[in-house]
Image (cartoon, rainbow, N blue to C red):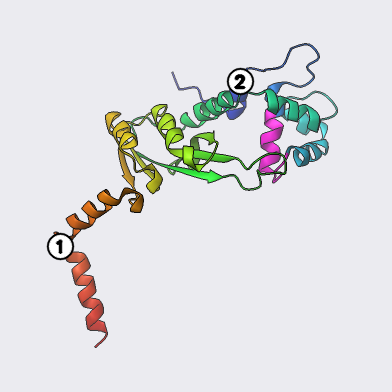
Amino acid sequence: MADIKFSLWDFLGAIPDPRSSSGRRYSLQSILGILIAGTLAGRNSVRSIARWAKLLNKNELILLGINRKTAPSQTTMHEVLLRLDEKLVEEAFSAWSNTFIDADQLLHIAIDGKTLSGSGTAEYPALHLIAAYCSEISSVIMQTAVESKKNEITAAKQMLFDMPLKGKLISGDAIFCQKEICHLILKNEGDYIFIVKKNQKQLLADIKEVFKKHSFPLYTQTQTNNRLRKY
């Protein structure tokens, strides 16, 4: 029997709706669908997404599971986002992206922390995320919000704990070059490559010392050829 592939729409439909069923005019699945579609259309705020959604025609609304003449308002979208459990949404997206991953395939997964451009307002601070990006499927397979850059290490450990690491190569910036993170990856049969900078002074010194004691024929030959070209 062939594996059944579910779409992102199916996973959105599995997210529990935090609202009371009485008076509910739009499904959570449809509201999330409009928020995602609006973002993909270049809108970067709930207000601009709501304005964009007002221009959708009847057939476009039906594709988003809406049988009404109009799309949900900015207020409706805002209230839903305030009540929504962000962890459940992250889990739904991660479960969907993981359907594209072959558990037995060697994959490269890069972890990185970034502040979301345009997410900061006068009322709310900019959103800082840590994400795991899989280059083979060109997709973020997991991400989580963190309060600030100083919490990236804790967030990375939790994210890696929830990920299948066997046979995976994890890479990241110097901030993730931590003993606990490296041990976690190796314990789960993965591998890693992290940048080493002055935040790990002794490790950096040890690496430099090791490289002093080894010769690299290809590098030496290249340097020799470059010097010969000068004459």
Rounded to the nearest angstrom, the CA distance separating label 2 from label 1 is 57 Å
Res 93 seen here: yes
Give the residue type that dot 2 points to: Ile
Q: What stretch is highlighted in magenta?
A: 32-45
- The secondary structure that most of the magenta stretch takes on is helix
**Spot occupied by residue 45 in the image (x, y as percentages of width and height):** 72, 41
The residue where tag 1 is placed is: 215
Reading the image, the residue beneath label 2 is 15
User: Residue at 74% across / 30% down in the picture?
Assistant: 78
21 versus 37 height, above or below: above
Residue 52, quarter of picture: top right
Foreground pick, 136 / 231 = 231
> Please, what secondary structure does the residue beneath circle 1 have?
loop
Report crowding for label 1: few under 14, some 14 to 19, many 20 or more residues within 10 A (C-alpha). few
Element class at badge 2: loop
Residue type pointed to by label 1: Ser
Residue at 69% x, 46% y: name it: 42
Point out residue 110 in the picture as x, y percentages from the top left corner: 42, 43
Q: Does the magenta stretch include residue 25?
A: no
Q: Mark 1 or mark 2, which is nearer the start of the sequence?
A: 2
Q: Which of 98 and 147 lies nearest the eye of the viewer? A: 147
